[in-house]
Each structure stands twice: as C-alpha cells, then as structure tokens.
Image (cartoon, helix red, strand yellow):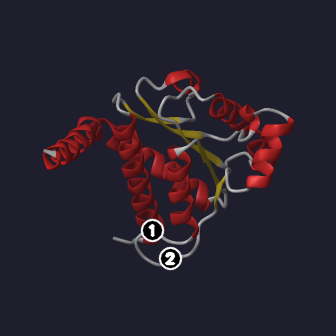
Amino acid sequence: MLNERVFTIFRESVEAKMEVGESLAPLIEEAASKITNALLDEKKILVCGNAASAAIAQIFTSAMLDRFERERPSLPAIWLGSNVATYTSIAADNSVNEVFSKPVRALGQAGDILLLLSTSGNAANLVQALSAAHDRHMPVIALTGRDGGDIASLIDVEDIELRAAVNSRSRIHEIHLLTIFCLCDLIDSQLFGLN
C-alpha cells in the first residue's frame, strides 16, 4: 500500500539524519560560530548551490535577511543565483562554470564567508566558486553529500565541510535543510540570545 511506502520514506529520513547527526553536530556548531564571528566583524555571507541546493541556499539567505524563528535585525547574506540576467549573461558569454566564481570575485572580501551546497561535491561551477573564495581569502563552509566529491579535496584549514555521508539525493537535501536550520538557530542564539 502507498501509505506503507510513505511511512518507509519517513523512517528512512529519520534514520539518515540520526546516522550523520552525531558527527555533524560539532561541525555545525563550529560553522555557526565562524558565521557569527564574521557577522560580528561586519562581514557578509555569500551563498550558492545548484538545483534543489539553490532552493536551500535561498532559504538560508531569506532567514538571514528577514528572520528565522523570531523577529530580529537583518543579517547580510547574498544568494549568488538571484540575478537571472547576470546569471544567464555569464553562462552565455563565458561558461556556466563561472556563474558563481565571477560574483564571488566581484563581491567577496577577505573575511566574508562562502556557504556552498552540493549533493555530489563535483559541480564545476561550485568548485570554481570555492577556488575564487580562496583567492579572495574567504573561508568556505561546504555542505556536501556522499563522499564529498571534488569539493572535499579542496577544503583547507580555514574551511569547514558539513558532509551528509549518505547515498540518497533526497536524504542529502533533507540533511542539508536541517543543517541550514541548525545554523540559523545557533547564529540567532549567539547574536541575539534568542531561544
């Protein structure tokens, strides 16, 4: 029956989150502190991802610019996929692989943070964005999946990888969304004492 299939999907979702939750918790705490410290230093967060990861990236920037659970001052976060004219111009005139790296080079300053999301860790445009962030002396917080892909191999000592080490794309997206919610909660708590 279909309702049994639904229950199975719910169970698999919970199991996947529990499987990685314990190992991710200290890294999420570290990432939230890194973002909080950057915000306290009047830096900004640049955010990017492809497809469903782009939607999760938008959720993060929305929570930063507007609010997460409670009203509080807006926080500077920029979703790099928001300007369709610029995005398509870069893709048409140069390469889709530069759609995030060009804005990182133009907008990113030393001490800003690049938050990127990738289920595979292999998207060339995200790999180039990570390299551009390093060129601009920006730490990277990378939400990856599976084995971390190419992005995992480029993580340096100033960066943090939050890897959802499961094989299902759906479960990875669910874990990334929950991770984003955890980051938002911890950032608000550290900056504003919101519980």
Residue at the image position 58 percent from the left and 68 percent from the top:
65
Is residue 171 left or right of 89 when viewed as pictured? left
Q: Amino acid at mark 1?
A: Phe
Image quadrant where one finds the N terminus:
top left
Pick the residue in front: 154 or 166: 166
User: Against 134, is 2 above or below?
Assistant: below
Q: Position of residue 60 (x, y in %)?
A: 51, 57
Is residue 132 left or right of 178 when viewed as pictured? right
Residue at the image position 44 percent from the left and 59 percent from the top:
184
Residue at the image position 64 percent from the left and 29 percent from the top:
127
Question: Can you identify the residue that label 1 sits on?
Answer: 68
Q: CA distance from mark 1 to mark 2?
A: 9 Å
The local secondary structure at tag 2 comes to loop
Q: How many marks?
A: 2
Q: Position of residue 146 (x, y in %)?
A: 40, 27
Asked whether disc 1 touches disc 2, contact meaning CB atoms under 8 Å apart, the reply is yes
Q: Amino acid at mark 2?
A: Arg
